[in-house]
Amino acid sequence: MALRFYSKRFATALRTSRANCCSARYASTAAALKDSSLPKDVKDSIAREACLPTPDPPSTSKTAGLVNQQLPYMVPTYVRPPPMFEKGEGCYLYDIENRKYLDFTSGIAVNALGHCDEGVAQAIAEQSQLLMHTSNLYHNPLTGLLSKQLIQLTHATGGFASATRTFICNSGSEANEAAIKFARKVGKEVSPDKDKFDIVSFYGSFHGRTMGSLSATPNPKYQKPFAPMIPGFRYGNFNDVDAVNDLVTGSTCGVIIEPIQGEGGVNVATPEFLIALRKRCTEVGAVLIYDEIQCGLGRTGNFWAHAGYPKECHPDIVTTAKALGNGFPIGATIVNDFVCDHIKTGDHGTTFGGNPLGCRVASYILSRLSSPEILDSIPKKSAAFKKHFDGLRERFPERLKEVRGQGLILGLQLDEDPTPIITAARERGLLIITCGTNMLRFVPPLIITEEEIDAGMAIVADAMESIWSRGEQVSGTPGQQEMR
């Protein structure tokens, strides 16, 4: 106990400013400890902690105490790193020990306006004092207003021109469930005497964890524990144009695809592939669904990611969530008349979806995310990230393989598991996550500044340097992506 006490005092005394690069501090600390009688592993731990601005909380910390008290009451569906966050502001998070972290994750592409945006907070405060919920058995002025706003913005920003109506729900999985059900209903009505119920999706996709969206997510790890999946789901290879005609057939009622696969590795669909899917869906009378839950609402620099593609590939349905609520749970399924003409009263529903509070918040958020202030800033910020990526690839040519993505949904491919980099970056004050295989994913708030990008990428560089050049032993952080 005494050894631990003095070690902690020593580490605290030696810790210096929160600079990005800690190599010099590490060396000086190690030198100061050289003649100490402490065991080597303790000296190494002290030296490392002393040079890190935000080292992970140890087992004796307040954070660990709270976590250990609470975990026995939680279903163990997630593996989380040690810090516990309690406050956010802009592009930063603060843990319960008041340590500051720059956030390049934005809650997995959710907090597009950053943490605790004043306008979002004001909308929540004002509406919570007026009306929060009535159910969909009654009208309220905000559900229809948000639906209208989504359709008008889709048209105004170059999204699919045939969009006419919106179903408001609570999450991305729910939005995709609605899309799958709508496609099934269209299939039954278009071909009542045939088995037109197949849904096509693609390897590397992630559409959610509910049974319908999970059935469209061909990841054996997630599907096997809950098998059998819902019948009628078929899978193809992303960007395989030649396979489209055999994959999408007369029995296909719908095709669901992410224009940019987020969890699967920031894989960008080619225009040729999406055009081929659109053409084939039209030929066989199938519904084309674009899942823009992660890549939509300004993240690519277009309001919708598909707006950057030729109009010949535009969809029949778009699903959205994540940034739509900036942390408040809300989703939406936008459809055209080809779909809506087959949906009748009672075909689908939701208790909480479209509640006045969520719609008020989303309406404000849409006004911000569709603004030139946001959309026009994305290309320059994306270029700033890519400039840093190029510098890192020059510095570590054998380690860094490929840059993927558009706008502020970007991926940096490594030649090995990136989770030690995740840990090293976090202990230097930066939050990043992974996706696909050996891929670092960058989905920061859309309000991030170029100065914050520079600061964060300096931390990434130092984290890589610490592991690949200085040989620092850092354990990986599991659970930093949905698809594993």
Image (spheres, grey):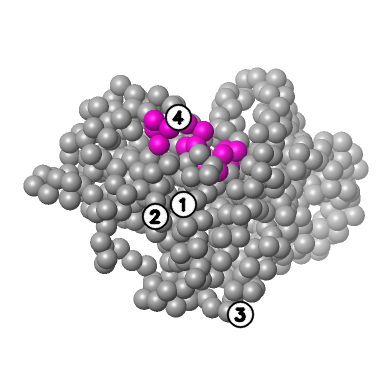
Residues rendered magenta in the picture: 299-314
Mark 4 or mark 3: whose residue is earlier in sequence = 3
Q: Marks 3 and 2, how far apart in space?
A: 29 Å
Q: Identify the residue shown where x is 46% and y is 51%.
A: 151
Q: Residue furthest left?
A: 193
User: In the rendered structure, which amino acid carries the disc numbered 2?
Assistant: Arg
Q: Quick one: SS at disc 2? A: strand
Label 4 CA crowd tier, 10 Å (few <14, some 14–19, many 20+): few
Q: Which residue is mark 3?
A: 129
Q: Which residue is mark 1?
A: 151
Label 1 CA crowd tier, 10 Å (few <14, some 14–19, many 20+): many
Q: Are marks 1 and 2 in contact (CB under 8 Å)?
A: yes
Label 2 CA crowd tier, 10 Å (few <14, some 14–19, many 20+): some
Q: Which residue is mark 4?
A: 310
Q: Marks 1 and 2, how far apart in space?
A: 7 Å
Q: Count up the numbered dots.
A: 4
Q: Are marks 2 and 4 in contact (CB under 8 Å)?
A: no
Mark 2 or mark 4: whose residue is earlier in sequence = 2
